[in-house]
Structures are given as C-alpha cells and as structure tokens.
Image (spheres, rainbow, N blue to C red):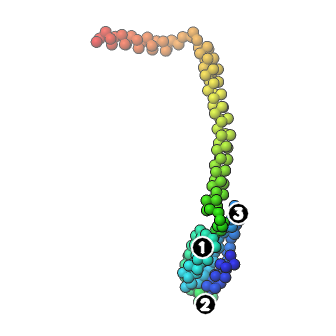
Amino acid sequence: MQSLRVLVVSHGGSVPVLNMGFDNDVWSGGMSCKVPTENVANFTFDVRKLIGDNGKVTHITINVVEKTVNQTGEPVVPMSDVSIGLRETLEGVAPVVNQLGTVTSWLVTGLVWTAQGLILFVPLCFVCLGIVLLVEKGIVPAWKREFKGKSFPKISRLGRQKQEQDAKAADMV
C-alpha cells in the first residue's frame, strides 16, 4: 500500500479513499485516488506493473473529468478519478485454494436455505396429508351416511326423463 501511495504522490495525485479487508487469510481492498489527467495513462501502467509484481489486479477503473475552473475562478489542474481493486495472492498456493473460501460460503448459504425449506416444507406436507385424510375418512363417509336412503325427487325425475328421451331416440332410428 505504501508503494502505491508513493506512486500516486510521484504522479502529482492524492489518495482520498483507501479500503482494506482481511478474509480467508488474504488481504483485499480498494483504493480511490485523484491523479492529474495528463499523468493518468502513465500512472495506470505503473500501478498495473507494481500490483502485478506483488499480487493480483482485480480491476482498475479510470474516470476522467475535466475541471479547469474552481469556485474562485482560479485555474485548477484537471484531476481524474482512478479506482483500483486489489487482492493478495498466497505464495505457493494454487489460486483454486483462494477461491474455495468463496465457494464454501456459497455452499453453506445454499445448504442453510435448503434446510430452512425442508423445515417448512415437510410439516406443511403432513398438514396437507392430514386434511386429505380428514376429508376422505371423516367428512365424506359422514356425508354419505347422512344422505343414505334419502331420495331426491327432482334428481330422480331428471334421470327418468333422460332415460325416456334415450328410448324414444332409439325407437326413431
């Protein structure tokens, strides 16, 4: 980090934002700096070389905004915003090992979601099964017993009329 700060200052810039994090035995972070627009290209290639020698560049974003006059009306050197993403690599360890930390966190999250789904889904299935059994074994037999032997004249009359119509249709043919 100190080397990057020296590089920024040597190109006439400043470092207003620096974020660092330590996760899975690896340092990572981001740095936002302001560099004069005329030095941006050289600065970017120097930073890329410096980081490439010591770690891994995840991203470098350059935003060139020309501002030539400030509020007092005095000319100002145009500054460009440069954002740099950094990630340390472990020596002697394959990059796959660094990525295992990310993959395991995704797997754990997926397994937790699956467990939560099962915790909700299995009891819900038993509730639905209970409702089906209650209807099939309790309500339907009681309903059939209640109406057993009772005649419904309207329904039986309609059935007879249908049979008579079918018989007449067969005779006509």
Q: Report, in whole angstroms, how far the alpha carbon at label 1 lies from the one at label 2.
A: 39 Å
Type of amino acid under label 2? Glu
Q: Is residue 70 visible in the rendered structure shown here?
A: no
Residue 153, position in %: x, y? 51, 12
Residue at 64% x, 73% y is 54
* Helix, strand or loop at mark 3: loop
Residue at 66% x, 31% y is 127
Towards the viewer: 16 or 109: 109
Residue 133, position in %: x, y? 63, 24
Question: Dividing the image into 4 quarters, which one contains the C terminus?
Answer: top left
Q: Nearer the viewer, mark 1 or mark 2?
A: 1
In-image side of 24 versus 49 (left or right): right
Q: Is residue 57 above or below residue 73?
A: above
The number of numbered discs placed on residues in the rendered structure image is 3
- The quadrant holding residue 162 is top left
Disc 2: which residue: 74
Mark before the other along the chain sequence, 1 or 2: 1
Type of amino acid under label 3? Asp
- The quadrant holding residue 140 is top right
